[in-house]
Image (cartoon, coloured by chain):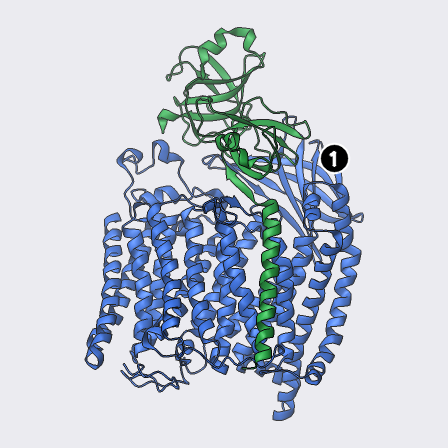
Chain colours: A blue, B green
Amino acid sequence: MVTLGLVLLGVALLAGAVSVGALLWGRSLGRGGEGVTHAGYLATFVAMGALTITILIMVAAFFRGDFTFYYVAQNHSTDVSSLSWLYKLSGLWAGREGSFLLWAWLLSLFASWVAYKRLEFTDALSNMGLMVTNLVLFLFTAGMLFSEPNNPFKVTPAGLLDPATGKLIGEAAAWGMNPLLQHWAMIIHPPTLFIGYAGLTIPFAFAMASLIVGDSSKKWIEIVDRITIFSWLFLGMGIGLGSVWAYVVLGWGGYWGWDPVENASLLPWLTGVGLIHSFTVYRRRDGFKRWAIMLSASTFALVILGTFITRSGIVTSVHSFEADPVSLYLFLSMIIGALVAAVVGIAMRWEMFAGNDEFESLSSKEAAYYFNNVIMMVAGWLVAYLTITSALPKWMLFGGRSIPASTFDAVARPVGVLYVLILAVCPLLSWKGTDGRTFWNRLKWPLVGGGVIAALLLTDFFTTLLPIYKRMIAMGTEPGLRMAQAGPAWYYSTIAVVGLLTASLLIATTTALFIDGARKRAAARGENFFQALLSIFTKARSQSGGYLAHIGIGVILIGLVGSAMFVQDQTFTIPAKAGSTFTVDRYKFTYTGSNDTQLANGDVSSVINLDVTHDGKSVGTVRPGMLQFAQQGQTKLEAKVLSEPLRDVFVVFQGSGETGELTINVKINPLISFAWAGFAILLLGTALAAWPKAGGELRAVPVARGKASPSKSRSKTATR
Amino acid sequence: MNKRARTRLIGVTAIILIAVAAIVLTTGNKSGAYTANVELVSKDASLVGKRVKVSGTVIAGSWDKKSDPMRFTIRDEADKAASGPTLKVIYSGSVPSTFGDGVVAIVTGELSKDGVVNANEMITKCPSKYESAEGAVPVADLVGKGASMVGKTVRMTGYVKPGTIAAATSGDRFIVAEKADGTGTSLPVAFTSALPSGMKDGSQVVMTGALEADGKFVATTLALEQGQK
């Protein structure tokens, strides 16, 4: 079975190569190349078929427990819970080789989707878009086949497998999936992320195609914009699930620590924001064309960098993989290749991609979109650079040094608030320029609504958040010192207050858009207000989805100010006697006992029971625990959270000392539910925007079979 | 294009970029830590006064968990022969529960002139499952030295006596013997953490710990002998 997998991987490689070759050849033949071009489309489906079977073979091997597969031997789960079947499935992406296979398979699915959709047109743009997609697929498959450490189909060496029983022996008996990965969020997190990663190859491929073909019309945008938003949505979901996992499994009480692996997923997401907004301007205003090309290339390059960071071990992180030289060169050349291709392409087609970028005024909508792009482009590449500095030579800026989370925070906080401010005022601006009176008229009511929200938030700030800050600084423990290092008290508070005010304004101005729109529609069509509001959501999906996402961002910012800047974090060591107590703020914890149990597979679980009261009223019992994995010799902390609407009480049992005393860490995370709720709104809005257009894609651009589009492009080469 | 608007646009862009660069440069230079190993830290004088991130094995008996701030000494993980340079660490902060002899500690802090790292960040990695038996005292020698060895931290090696491995909750974990078949001098071993995976009857093990007065060996680290990889 291992050999069959290897052979099919070879078939996929060949099919990828054939497709690239056929599409290029078909193009060079001009009108007579139709048949050859079709072969290129066909080969896309062959590659997808072959990769689908390899995936099935691998998954089957995990379910059969077939340890002749080296990859299965290394990544199988030893779990015995009711979720064990899921861990068998997730073994596929628990290691590097399998992750690559999944990546390649997902890309082949996207390629096939595009091939299927464009098969009846086979226009020059789609042909070249498919060509670039398959080129990427080819490189990925080659990376798996020709680099030993990346190859998912390797046979377990003879000495490690008992041929009679099929069981692993010797050193291999200790192999298995990292126990920290055995959590539901960690099971969905990688595939959602990889769907996003793979899908973001498509806008890049079509951007390149538009340069190759010389078609600067909005046609390529219309082919890829839904796939782009869809992929960006999945990337966002992946980031969210990763945060959930970090919050409940890693047990440090936070959900974002600027860890290289976390950053890896964020990089393309940031430039993706710029990309999606450039698409809007491209489609509606015929502008931002070079931006769209550069952002799609940047997003793709950062996708590859992200894959590289997480799966190559170039940057040391708690959960990264070992390094290998072939991946280094392969990925590095893909990153540089994508950027060079975009820059050279734009240089060659400079005039054609000029676009309608007339800036009339700084108070125009164009300017808001422009700053959106600048900030996201800078953010994406800056975070990328700061993430990999420890792997860079010493003569480069920060080379050889790992940049701590505090630096990321120091930049992200003011820039994030500025960015949200742009989002908040953007709906108040007009294209070309905004005169003061219109601006004021649009601002009036949102200012009232935003003022109400802001008043509530500021009340919470002065009664809850600020006192926490003062307490933590007074305690002088490590978390308090970190707060003190983030700047003087006035700066810390100002950032927080401005953040809350900006978030209120964003929520208000964007909500006003919906109310205003519904009222106008209701008046024009004689519908009632709620009917009109509903049809705004169902009819103008990309716009209303986008604005809903903006509201989500505002809600997230509220959550971030509370739960990232004002955490009360205390660690206690108490004697392991029933009745021992400690207090954190208004919460009192009483130790009532512990349970130690040994599971069937030898793992030992220790759980402690703590009764909790809030202002003297009982709010329940928390049972944080610790699981010791017998086979892997690792410990997993099982944190427990008491959620209240305005705060989480996060309790971790960190272990018992030599004389039996218990170490317990408690964090009070204010407003954290806003971060999760905002994220849900963001995803909902994005999903609404990603929803396929009625009547199929490209209704606006009918293309005759084998002919080029009737585009408004200034290009002459488009008729190929 | 409106020229004035264009100039303003470029101006605002420049302001944003300069502000971001300024924040990155000031905070990054203050807190970015150089990744280095113990040998490099002891040789490279240019690192003095800078923040460094060093990882190394905690030298047995060099620490006391209860002192605050805690002091301990580390040496490079690769330095199995224990002949290379060592590095003193002063750490203020909560000590991870897995900290102990032979554990790999990754510390971040400023390197002082007298070559001490004043760390305020520490994470621990699980010790390797395999260790060389070189320099470790065989069971018979340890027992043979009698009362003079009681309470002293030593590295010792022996074989797991067949049929004696018990669960973590039951006090004595297993009996270590002079020979693989369980014969010769033997000692009961107490060890509270998880056993190294792959350890079975007759495995050769390398332990760090101390002999107690009641003749029991209390191990703080436990690894399989390297040859069994």
Name the one closer to the observer, A290 or A540: A290
- Which residue lies at the image location 26% right of the left edge and 71% below the top edge? A41
Residue A83, given in percent of the width and then of the height, sits at: 47, 49
Crowding near the residue tagged with mark 1, few <14, some 14–19, many ≥20 C-alpha atoms within 10 Å? some
Quadrant of the image occupied by residue A39: bottom left
- Which residue lies at the image location 72% right of the left edge and 43% below the top edge? A611
Q: Which residue is mark 1?
A: A580
Name the one closer to the observer, A599 or A147: A147
Q: Please tell me how many numbered marks the rendered image carries.
A: 1
Q: In which quadrant is the C terminus of chain A drawn?
A: bottom left
In the image: residue A207, left or right of residue A544: left
Residue B124, given in percent of the width and then of the height, sits at: 54, 35
Q: Is residue A432 above or below residue A87?
A: below
Q: Is residue A599 above or below residue B151?
A: below
Q: Which amino acid lies under the numbered mark 1 shown in the image of this protein? A: Ser
Quadrant of the image occupied by residue A102: bottom left
- Res A454 visible: yes
Q: Secondary structure at mark 1?
A: loop
Residue B83, given in percent of the width and then of the height, sits at: 46, 21
- Res A365 visible: no
Q: Is residue A146 above or below residue B98?
A: below
**Chain ID at mark 1:** A
Q: Is residue A213 above or below residue A703?
A: above
Quadrant of the image occupied by residue A101: bottom left
Residue B201, given in percent of the width and then of the height, sits at: 40, 23
